[in-house]
Structures are given as structure tokens and as C-alpha cells.
Amino acid sequence: MEALQPAVGKRMLDATFGRGGHSRAMLAAGADVVALDQDADAERAATSLAAEFPWRFTFRRVNFSTLVTVSDELGPFDGILFDLGVSSPQLDTAARGFSFQLDGPLDMRMNQEAAVSAADLVATASERELADLIFRYGDEPRARRIARAIVDERQREPITRTARLAAVVEQAVGGRRGAKIHPATKTFQALRIAVNDELGALRAALAVTPPALGKHGRLGVISFHSLEDRLVKDFIAIRSEPELRGDRYAFGRPNPDYCFRKLGRWLPADNEITANPRARSARLRAAEKIV
């Protein structure tokens, strides 16, 4: 809220509604809020805010990559917030299949109407494709070993449950052996990102964010892993330099993408991590549109 500065007379876009914590905080500050989320459960959760703030809150069930259509219809916003990745309710609901800690169907679809689930991906991707996505999206150095184990196991019986996939991964890498995180953490992250095309959606959304913000409008992005954070960091950085420099532009050249002033980066405090361990890897980056 400090970074985005919602207030009376401002219109904010909560691009990742989840269960509405950020939307409620912005509404409490007096701002009008348009919220987006592709999850049907989020849409149901939004009904209470719509009833409480009928003139100041609007919900649209869409992927945030399409936010340009919302801004084209409603005009520019004074603030846009992205809280990336999976939400706690999604993790805590076994039937959604996001967590290796709760046995459930291997689903992982944020939009339950999407065609391909994690089980489909695990069943049909080649060993090389699985290894590539687990390495690329999970930063997992043992990706080839894990992919080989998945392919071997699915030949015996389809892998359709989260607990079974977690067990396959744990066995493939030789168990936990004092590891700080579960051996399947990175594999589950990679499959989730692939199933939902999270990085593609983020790139598409960031690309249309500058025209969706009014002058002095503010962008805030909370990310939870390095792939997301790097995209956001580079996106803001390249748009925060008035001139392009380097070997190609020895004397500088006006930057056609220049539009932002960096506001900074925020990390969770120790007391927040204690109260909410899932916040430990969170990073908030923010910028103000000045051109």
C-alpha cells in the first residue's frame, strides 16, 4: 500500500485477486478497485466484496495477460498490482493439485477450464521435454534424473496423484537427507509454471502495463522466485533509463521505452516471515510512470 498509494478518487487494478486481501486494503483506503482473476473460486470469493462495495468494486474473471482490454474499456489506472504465482487457498486445497504435501489429483490449473492439467503434461511430454521444463522453470540441477524416473514410472502406471509424483521425485534424487525444502518442490513449481504458462502471461501483461497506467500511476509486482523477479526487474530497469548507452550508442540515444521512475524493492521483515512463512521468498518491486 505504501508503494501503490491507493486513495479516494484513485482507481486501482488488482490483477491477481486471489481471495481479495489486496483489493480490500485498497478499498479501505478509499480507492475504486477493478480486480482480475482466472480462478472460478476467486470469482466466488469476490461476491462478498462486490456486495460490500457495490459502487467501488468490480471483478472480471480473466487472465491478467488480457488487462489491455480492461484498460481500453475503462481507461488508465492510478495503480496496478500483480501478486504472482499460486495463492494460499489454491495450495491448501488438495483437490486443486498444487501441493505435494496434500494428496490430490495432479491438476495445477489456475483456470479450471483450461485443457491441459499437470497429469496430462506428465503423461504426454517426452523425457527430454520434462527434463527441459523442470530445469528451466524449476532451476532443478537433477532434472534429467527426475524426468527419467517419471517416464519409467508412468510406463508402469499413469501418475495422476500429487503424492505419487512427489514420491517418484523423492526416490529419484535419493530422499531428503536434511534438505531445507522437499525434493519435489522445484519439480512441482516447474510443472505449475508450464501448465499455466505463467511466464508467458507475465510477459504479455507487463508489455501492456505502461499504456494501462495514467501519468504518475504506480506499478507494483510481488514475485516469489527468481524467474519472475528477473523478468520484472529487467522490465522496470530498461524503462527507467532516459538514454540507451553501450557499444552501440557510445554517445547515448533517447530510449523509446523510457516511462518509469524506480521506486525500489521491498523484502519481507523477519516478523512477517515468522507470521507467514510463505512470505520468505517474496519480493516487491515498484515503479511510477512519469512519461
Image (tube, helix red, strand yellow):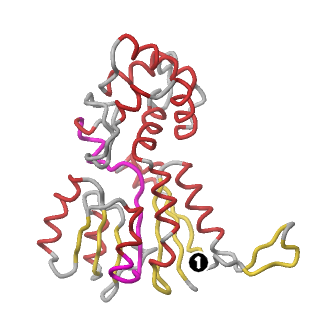
Task: Kindly identify which residue carries mark 1.
Answer: 260
Q: Position of residue 180 (x, y in %)?
A: 49, 31
- Identify which residue, 14 or 118, lies in the foreground: 118
Point 39% across, 69% down: residue = 67
- Boundaries of the magenta span: 71-94
Point 88% across, 73% down: residue = 250
- Identify which residue, 63 or 163, lies in the foreground: 63
Tell me the amino acid under the disc marked 1: Phe
Residue 231 colored in magenta in the image: no
- Identify which residue, 260 or 269, lies in the foreground: 260
Q: Tag 1's secondary structure?
A: strand
88 over 134 or under it: above or below: below
Quadrant housing residue 13 = bottom left
Quadrant housing residue 120 = top left
Q: Where's the N terminus, which quadrant?
A: bottom left
Crowd rating for badge 1 (residues with CA inside 10 Å; few <14, some 14–19, many 20+): many
Residue 77 colored in magenta in the image: yes
Q: Where is residue 218 in the image (x, y as percent from the top left)?
A: 47, 77
Point 50% across, 65% down: residue = 206
Q: Where is residue 111 in the image (x, y as percent from the top left)?
A: 29, 49
Q: Where is residue 235 in the image (x, y as percent from the top left)?
A: 59, 65
